[in-house]
Image (spheres, rainbow, N blue to C red):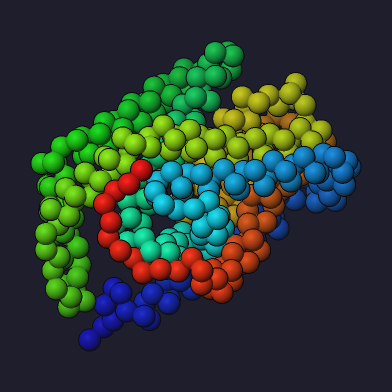
Amino acid sequence: MTDGPTSPASSTLKRVLQGLLSTAVVVGIFAFVFPRIASYEDVWGTIRAMTVLEAGILFVVGFWNLVTYWFVLTAVLPGLRLGQAAISNQASTAVSNTMPGGGILGVGVTFAMYRSWGFTTADFARATVVSGIWNNYVKLGMPIVALALLALSGDAGAAEIISAIVGLGVLFGAIVILWLMVRSEGMARKLGDLGARVLSRLRRLIRKPPIEGGGDSAVDFFRRTGELLKARWLRLTVSTLVSHISLYIVLLVALRNVGVSEDEIGWIKILAAYAFVRLISAIPITPGGLGVVELGVTAALSIGADEALDAQIVAAVLLFRFITFVLPIPLGAASYVFWRRNKSWRKKPVDAPFAT
């Protein structure tokens, strides 16, 4: 008998292959591609030329970017304290940025923390789904905004304008689908029954009993989701927008502080590069998009640039990623240790009615 699709051996092999592929991509980008864009000696010289004030401002903006997402988490999970949001977010981010398939592992870390603080599985699922949907709305929306700004400035052609219109249609459709699922009990029940059938077939492969009551569970889930959105949609929308814009501002400040002026690369072009690369980085090629994000942003910004400007762009992108990708890793490790040792926040999960 061969191992099933969920056997430990096949899972281990998959993780090993993912790790090897990720390593090959990262090494290829940083060891072979980047040196063709700008020499690391010139890049390091550009970074060293920054003043203490410029470096300090960049780190303050980077820390603020970390903090902004904590407010998104407290918005989607009533009862979650800001300190708990900080600990869970930093720990899950560290896992996501260091492990192959880290996104899923990061979700597992968050789930374990939320359960230890008394939140139910339904609380966690609802918070994860809603925050994920809002993040994807913004990820879809930012390229549309960037293309619209490029069009207004006269830098967008017909293809870019058509892309913006198509993207706007996709975003509008996604919002309508969510609204229908939240408002329509019949659609929610059908979706729940369909999901239960699919999961039951998968569970049958590992000799687990089928899932029952999928429709009723889905109705209850979307009813509570609707209550959450009715009470907190504005808070959630504002905090999500602030979080994404803050990340863009880190890149903008990094470019300006290494000497890239508005005349050389305008803020709209930087926004467009950032927004489109954020969409591409959603494909889990490497942990946290390591290498892929750096190369994508650099390639988008360095079109038509000379050697001196290339070195400044690479320096800014590497600083941007150091602050937003590397720094959260030790912070996340410390957060995980704090969670393991701190018992004062622990309590058993208890189902409770929705509260604002």
Q: Is residue 249 above or below residue 197?
A: above
Name the residue nearer the viewer: 93 or 11. Answer: 93
Q: Residue at x 21, y 39 (%)?
A: 181
Total label count?
0
Name the residue nearer the viewer: 178 or 84. Answer: 84
Residue 260 placement (x, y as % from top left): 77, 31
Q: Is residue 204 above or below residue 57?
A: below
Q: Is residue 131 above or below residue 262?
A: below
Horizontal arrangement in the rendering, residue 121 relative to residue 162 (left or right): left
Q: Quadrant of the C terminus?
A: top left
Residue 42 placement (x, y as % from top left): 85, 46
Horizontal arrangement in the rendering, residue 206 relative to residue 239 (left or right): left
Q: Residue at x 65, y 35 (%)?
A: 249
Direction bottom: furthest residue: 1
| Residue 40 in view here | yes
Residue 26 placement (x, y as % from top left): 61, 59
| Residue 19 in view here | no
Q: Quadrant of the N terminus?
A: bottom left
Q: Is residue 49 above or below residue 205?
A: above
Q: Residue at x 17, y 78 (%)?
A: 207
Name the residue nearer the viewer: 355 or 144. Answer: 355
Q: Residue at x 13, y 53 (%)?
A: 216
Residue 323 placement (x, y as % from top left): 69, 50
Where residue 65 sits, quadrant-wise, is: top right
